[in-house]
Amino acid sequence: MEVLQSAKLADVLYDVRGPALTRAKELESAGHRVLKLNIGNPAPFGFEAPHELLEDMIANLPIAQGYSDSKGILSARRAVMQYAQNKGFPSVDVEDIYLGNGVSELIVMALQGLLDNGDEVLVPAPDYPLWTASTSLAGGRAVHYRCDESNGWQPDIEDLESKVTDRTKAIVVINPNNPTGAVYDRPVLEAITEVARRHGLLIMADEIYDKILYDDTVHTSIASIAPDLLCLTFNGLSKAYRVAGFRSGWMIVSGPKKHAASYIEGLDLLANMRLCPNVPAQHVIQAALGGYQSIHDLLLPGGRLLEQRDLTWKLLNEIPGVSCVKPRGALYCFPRLDPEVYPVQDDRRLILDLLEEQHVLVVQGTGFNWFAPDHFRIVTLPRVEQLEDALGRIRSFLEDRDWS
Ligand code: PLP
């Protein structure tokens, strides 16, 4: 008897680790060196975690053998609470903080607890595709609002509001944004809160890159400017603290919770059902948030992340017919291929051909729910020599291809 996947998965896509990655692994098994620039995972590129995180994890292992409280250990939740207070979140208590196996688990939980079949969530295009996938998995429908490339990829507020219906439950804000690297200006965030206010919508803010900012960019948490709105803010250790493998993240519920008692009860139930997040990884949250913020050294002039962002952006823009908005945050570039020069019909095919011909793996723009096959995402984590190599190969691939 054939075993079929459930119908629930029909609209669930996650191309960051899609078929192209499977093919890249086959090429590697056959002895080829593949430049994998598809995943925002700092460790394989030689980034190390702050040492005190590793020390804390090891020192606490003996007391991390059992399950913890479903929401997570108190010392870590206190540290997150303090972080939230420093960022201006309104009325946050330890009970409003849920720790998770990465932000990913909490995104799935938050949407599972919110959506009935057919409910809609406003998700940015382009987006980090877990948001769209988790909305679909929860029975909902992701309705994509446009971010405007000609305006530094800031959300188009008119488009956002035009897509609100009586089924809309929430607005997702990914700031700093993956894949575009946009960091949203305060007036834009205020405009989003006004839409949420006018239509009674919950805000879900994915701020996992809030400490990865370039060129003196300042990050504002949307929760801090909307004390009257229910906000769920997501963050964790994977990026700024370079321990994606620890699977450690958190979700902060802020704003007027008394109107959300039923939803919060649901979140508590879902947290209980997964028993608790990985306990050793919870023990490093306090050390991470309270310790030396070494991420800043990587972002200042002379810092590795800044140099790599600058180089990737420069080399992309030097390719004829390619343009890229300068990322102000996060770990990616999201360049545009001018359709007049590169009339791409199928960007998934394009990315597979790039992989076959040049052994460089990136992710097609439609994998981030972008509307047209005219973008791709590349991570800025590799060292400059590797980026030069990869960008040289991408350029040759584009220039040598028969576009007629
Ligand atoms: N949110 C965004 C915007 C991301 O880019 C990622 C990972 O790339 C995640 C969430 C998942 O993070 P975690 O490792 O905490 O599950």
Image (cartoon, rainbow, N blue to C red):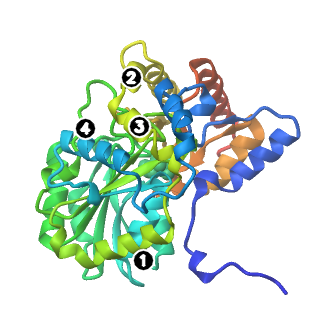
- Look at the numbered disc 3 and say if its residue's Cβ is closer than 8 Å to ligand 1: yes
**Is there a contact, CB below 8 Å, between mark 3 and mark 4?**
no
Q: Which residue is mark 4?
A: 219
Q: Which residue is mark 1?
A: 140
Which residue appears farthest toward the front when viewing the image?
62
226 sits left or right of 173 in the view: left
Compare marks 1 and 3 and give the one earlier in the sequence.
Answer: 1
Which residue corresponds to the image point at 29% horizontal and 46% vertical from the top-left? Answer: 78
Residue 341 visible (yes or no): no
Q: Which residue is mark 2?
A: 299
Which one is in front, 19 or 79? 79
Q: Secondary structure at mark 2?
A: helix
Q: Judge the density around disc 3: few (<14), some (14-19), many (≥20) Cα neighbours within 10 Å.
A: many
Q: Secondary structure at mark 4?
A: loop
Q: Secondary structure at mark 3?
A: loop
Image: 72 above or below 318? below
Compare marks 2 and 4 and give the one earlier in the sequence.
Answer: 4
